[in-house]
Amino acid sequence: MTVMHTASVEVMEPVPVIEPPVAAPAPADVESAEWLRALRADDGSRDAAIARLHALLLRAARFEIARRRASLPHLRGNELDDIATEAADDALMSVLRRLDDFRGASRFTTWAYKFALLEAAVKLRKRAWQGREIPLEPDRWAIQPSRALGPAAASEQTEVMGAVSEAIAAALTPHQRTVLVAVALNGVPIDVLAERLNSNRGALYKTLHDARRKLREHLRERGFALDNYLEEE
Amino acid sequence: MTKDFEIDRTLGLLLGPGAPEVGCDACFEQLDGYVELELAGADADAAFPGFRAHLVGCPACREEHDSLFALISSERR
């Protein structure tokens, strides 16, 4: 880990949030086209297609629950089954409501699966945080340097963390501080936080994005080179 | 010099990806197409600019991407 204090301060340009263009529909593959036909049919085949779709969505919801099972030891099997069914039901409503939004960028089933995974993930995150206090007051946070490091590294970390702490206190609005501290420091899922704040995930991520940009600008103006810390794959 | 990955991770979450990124809504819209390109071995990042940066900055969207990738992968084995 290297901290560089550059003589000439390079202020980072604001990072725009990309607004993607609306993709033109691509020709659906045969299987996807059949799903769309059956789900739009006005005869008995629609009910059968809806039942098959619900089964697929339930499978996806159960898959998501199985992936997160270890983090939910307090939930019993029947509670998890209920969550899977609710997720599949809600996902089915979303898929049927948004059939015209399917652009053919993937197989229809892949497109549909994501709704069930989202519904299951959101429900499980909310259950995991049910009854847990979320510190929303901006003052209730602290960044501690690692105790495991040697004096030189600890000193460097203290300097960086001190600068970050100062930037959080000085550069952000109270709302930006609340969102950044909750999501980035306290690990609060963004949809859980959105529910507590009567907001939505997209709006809170925009707040988080703006807060991060302000932090980076603040630190760069003070001579910190941040390339080692910006998250990358 | 010792590298403390936990502190690096915290700083990474605080500072974000630092690259242009899509928002959560666009990420969800593009998720299925991105995952299928990944599984096909195509250049998903070129097809969906800003998507990968968002996964780096948004833990929730990252989880949902990883779940869809794992589900589709398991079906196609």
Image (spheres, coloured by chain):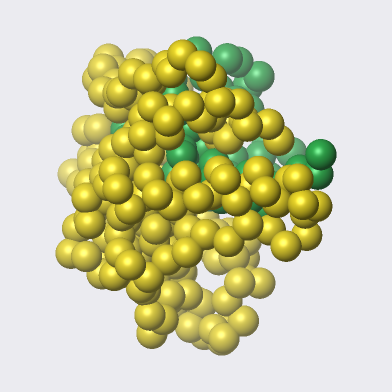
Q: Which residue is at 47% across, 64% downward?
A: A142
Q: Is residue A85 above or below residue A153?
A: below
Q: Which residue is more in the foreground, B61 or A60? A: B61
Image position, residue B29 (x, y; %): 34, 34
A63 up-or-down from B10: above or below: below
- Whether residue A78 sits left or right of residue A21 in the image: it is right
Residue B73 shows in the view? yes
Residue shown at the point (67%, 52%) measured from the top left: B6
Quadrant of the image containing the C terminus of chain A = top right
| Residue drawn at the location 29% of the way across and 43% of the way down | A171
Residue A161 location, x and y as percent?
54, 49
Q: Quadrant of residue A160?
A: top right
Residue B16 in the image, given as x and y percentages of width and height: 46, 38
Front residue of A191 and A98: A191
Of residues A174 and A62, the one nearer the viewer is A174
Q: Quadrant of the N terminus of chain A?
A: top right
Q: Is residue A119 visible?
A: no
Picture layout, residue A100 above or below residue B13:
above
Q: Give the left or right position of residue A154, taking residue A167 as reference.
A: right
Left or right for B16, reference A159 = left
- Comparing B68 with A133, the one in front is A133
- Tell me residue A21's x, y (percent): 26, 17
Count the numbered circles shown: 0
Q: Colour of chain B?
A: green
Q: Residue shown at 41%/81% (left/top)?
A: A132
Q: Colour of chain A?
A: yellow
